[in-house]
Image (cartoon, helix red, strand yellow):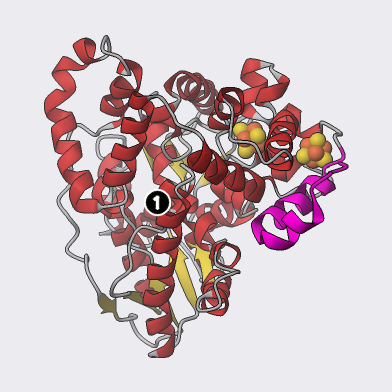
Amino acid sequence: MQTTFAPERLEADPQLASSEKILRTCVHCGFCTATCPTYVLLGDELDSPRGRIYLIKDMLEQDRPATTEVVRHVDRCLSCLSCMTTCPSGVHYMHLVDHARAHIEKTYRRPPLDRLMRATLAFVLPHPGRFRLALTAARLARPFAGLLAKLPGGPRIAAMLALAPAALPAASANDGARTFKAAGERKARVALLQGCAQKVLEPSINDATIRLLTRFGVEVVHAAGEGCCGSLVHHMGREEESLAGARRNVDAWTRVIEDGGLDAIVVTTSGCGTTIKDYGFMLRDDPAYAAKAARVSALAKDVSEVLATLPLKPARPTGQTVAYHAACSIQHGQQIREEPKAALKAVGFQVKEPAEGHLCCGSAGTYNILQPEIATRLRDRKVANIERVGGEVVAAGNIGCLTQIRSGTALPAVHTVELVDWATGGPLPAALEGHGFEGMADAAE
Ligand code: SF4
Ligand code: SF4
């Protein structure tokens, strides 16, 4: 794609220079439109990757504040990155849309309700204490969901209430900065991201990860001072907040690297993994952090990548059929396809893959709250494909997808790592109680 940016602007602004390079790699072929969930649903070129690329190019090239039209179509983008998997020219859409979102945040004044909703999400979600309180309030407000839905901004409030779990698990006994020793000889040492929303919604996921990794000789460290990876605010264009989160985590893991070394930084929420793998890029122009951030990104691994290095085998009879849902952030964001399925198969599960596996389930961070109508249509389509494939349980590697899928089906849905932990000797995941797995659990005891 031809561009006409003034050379002095590119020289003065490295982010603009990087986006201009991305724009020039797009050859307008349109292959990406066929696999873009919003284009598939809405059929509007401006809701396709190519259409958005044109809108972003025009906005950046003319150095214009974002218009309502640009905001509407960029807001509808899920950042699922399906377009990046499809694009034959290697267009780095993720970095381009991240830049566009930051530009929108700086130059566009959203309507008051939209501003309030976004500010609330950014204030609450990355902080486990605040998130826990908000979920308690959501539970109390749920009986009034019908009334609240009629207020201005009601559909978003209703979407938020629908996603809040009926009961909150207690905080994990594993919380906080500490080290979990490997069982037997130590073969590797990793840091495990504790994160933010997942540890409130489902602490069992990281608990299962610690059990599983230590069982196979991996020492697991919770780094002091680590927190939200920054992706929730990053996708809202709140650049400074996301960079602050990235710097804090880089510092936390650098201290661990310098005090004993690390073989990997393990992430069990693939959305966070995509962002942490991008810290090197996000902080590339910060001389104090560029090298440290690149080192952290190089060490970051989705938990399924670590499972691929372990000699997994079942410790109890398994054989159940698992419908594997590939989170966009795993398959498109991190280009990880085989490892989660291989881990499930290695411990005896039969793995089935639903049709249209490349399409997003509609979760996408805060998307299912901010764009509830499109998100619900995508969820229903995803759930229909999952139910058609006929598994006894759904497995996915991202808490957002699990929450979204569960809100549309009676099938149990658990993190891949919880199934692998159970199959290799861990306890039955609570979500599987009453689903015919108990007999298998007893057989191993
Ligand atoms: S990230 Fe997903 S929703 Fe956004 S343009 Fe690409 S394919 Fe479409
Ligand atoms: S597939 Fe790639 S090169 Fe083709 S229009 Fe889409 S982003 Fe541009």
Nearest the eye: 342 or 109: 109
| Residue at x 73% of width, y 54% of height | 9
> Residue 295's image quarter?
bottom right
Nearest the eye: 351 or 281: 281
| Residue at x 51% of width, y 73% of height | 296
Residue 357 seen by the camera: no
- Residue 45's spot in the image, x, y percent? 73, 21
- The overriding secondary structure of the stretch rendered in magenta is helix
Ligand 1: quadrant of the figure:
top right
Please state, as top left, top right, bottom left or bottom right, where the C terminus lies in the image. bottom left
The magenta span reads 1-27
The residue to which callout 1 is attached is 419
The answer to whether residue 15 is magenta is yes
Please, what is the three-letter code of the amino acid marked with disc 1? Leu
Nearest the eye: 436 or 276: 276
Secondary structure, mark 1, is helix
- Residue 426's spot in the image, x, y percent? 30, 60
